[in-house]
Amino acid sequence: MTVETPKNLTFFTPEFSKNEGTIFIDTGISAGFPSPADDFRETRISLDDELISNREATFFAKVSGQSMIGAGLDDKDLLVIDRSIEPTNNKIAVCFLDGEFTVKRLRVQGEEVWLQPENPNYPIIKITEDNNFVIWGIVTSVIKKV
Amino acid sequence: MFALVDCNNFYASCERVFNPNLQGKPVAILSNNDGCVISMSDEAKKIGLPFGAPIFKWEEFCKQQNISVLSSNYPLYGDMSERVMKILAQFSPDIEVYSVDESFLELKGFDNINLEAYATKIRSRILQWTGIPVCVGIAPTKALSKVANKIARSNIKQSKGICIIDSEEKRVLALKWTKIGKVWGIGRRLKTRLETKGIITAFDFTQLASSLVLKEFSIVEWRLQKDLQGISKILLEDTTSSKKMIATTRSFERTFSNIHDIKERVSTFATSCAEKLRKQNSSCYMLIVMLRSDRHKKDEAQHSVSKTVVFSNPTNSTLTLSSAAVKAVSTIFKSGIKYKRAGVIVTGIVAEDNYQLDLFSTENPKHKPLMQAIDKLNRTFKADKIKLANQDLKRTWKMRQERLSPKYTTNINDVITVK
């Protein structure tokens, strides 16, 4: 993150890794030849690393219903939601609308906001002042069981 | 400069993130066992629900006033707290997590930074990323940053959640506005003592001769006075190291006068302390067991007692700690007393692998692998599958949590549903 100062200096705050540091060598230490594979050990693929870019702002939700099947969001799919992403046109967002969580594609035109389902059987929703409306977070991935 | 960042009505705010229908409405959170109100939203405070209200007496009131009453959901609050604190750590490398919902940040070398803009950024980032509203108080010392935070909190609309004490006038004004009882570290007893001396505000306290403070009170109050005068004497504490004391204490949902019941409880608390020790890879030299009767029931016989056990070599074995705790109960338990509260505290904590070995070590070396196995099984199967025989196996002690919200962030089956 950066902070603007009057003197045009930009400050950078270091990132803190939770990496514990030393690796535990569980093969033991022998006086003979070391395992030739040890040198080539790598970290396993982590879905956390692949799917989550901001851990502190990431939450999960489960899809209920068919309104977004066109976008590949099926009933019971698990959504990865990042609250730190700016909501803009065309993004898929989890919104809180009139007492209920809903997931729809955002359509922003000037001052107007529409929630567009990806299923022809569902109506497009225009957000008005009468609605109790909050954009809760932006969907970044969908995890589905096959 | 120091910043004190405090989450507003933290528990209620956590619930609101995942149930936005509670936004703007009165919410109250109950203690363990659904006993009494321990946290509430501003709306609930305004209606007149008091802190600590025993819910069985206020049930009707809450219903009439439409106050949403919830059990405390500690897995949720713990996770949300961790998120908030990690975001805060992005704003300063010098952070002291002071409690579940507040942290001090030391702003060293921030002289050229616009603190108001910085505080605004802290607030908006935490709100956007986690949904938790916070207030920020900034001042030259820790005690003053606490004062600033209270002022920011007292009128969020006007303060926009931020108060910065960066001049002598602002400091004096802030201290004159702050009642002595509201000052950080001034407890009920100290407040009364100071008030009888005519000290009503924090400002009055700073006007006392410091030699007098030192003589009549202690170094703690002297440091506090200096801090309030703007001279930093209370330093940031290092909270990255392991805990120096671990406690598991509970009030029971009813009273117990049978020694077997108490032993069972104490054994369970010792087990929990041992698990916490192992989790942070440490052992302890000392264990304290305490028992307490219900001090609110003035007509009943009272007994408040504790017993300390010292180990010759540090341990984190459930077996050792539990049997020591149970033995301690036998020596302090008095029959005929209705006990309402018990606790186990372990202290004298050292790193597990870094202590003086004892030639005549008394602990069976088999404990260590056994504990590792138990921990692993209990972690895998959740719900503490392996217990000591002196713990109740039927789990009749389950916490009363009748109004618990889902574990939105720690259990995959409990995440929010979106249509």
Image: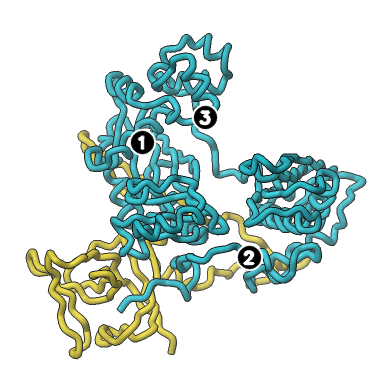
Chain colours: A yellow, B cyan
Discs 1 and 3 share one subunit: yes
Mark 1 vs 3: CB contact within 8 A: no
| Distance between the alpha carbons at the discs numbered 2 and 3 | 34 Å
Residue B309 drawn above or below residue B25: above
The reply to whether the C-beta atoms of the residues labelled 2 and 3 are less than 8 Å apart is: no
* SS for dot 2: loop
* Cα–Cα span, label 1 and label 2: 38 Å
Q: Is residue B328 above or below residue A37?
A: above
Mark 1, mark 3: which one is toward the viewer? 3
* Residue ID for mark 2: B398
Write the residue at 44% across / 15% down: B198
**Who comes first in sequence, dot 1 or dot 2?**
1
Q: Residues within 10 Å of mark 3 (few under 14, many from 20)?
A: few
**Amino acid marked by disc 2:** Lys
- Name the subunit of mark 2: B
Mark 1 and mark 3 lie on one chain; the one further toward the N terminus is: 1
Q: x%, y% of residue B68?
A: 39, 60
Q: What residue occupies the far right of the structure in this picture?
A: B360
Which residue matches tag 3?
B188
Asked whether, in this view, residue B194 is left or right of residue B27, the answer is right
For the residues beneath circles 2 and 3, the answer to whether they share a chain is yes
Disc 2 or 3, which lies upstream in sequence? 3
Distance from Cα at disc 1 to Cα at disc 3 = 21 Å
Q: Position of residue A87 (x, y in %)?
A: 22, 65
**Dot 3: chain letter:** B
Please say whether residue A7 is visible from this viewpoint. Answer: yes
Picture coordinates of residue B416 (x, y %)?
38, 72
Q: Is residue A10 visible?
A: no
Q: Amino acid at mark 3?
A: Arg
Secondary element at image label 1: helix
Tell me the quarter of the picture where residue B229 sits: top left
Q: Which residue is mark 1?
A: B149
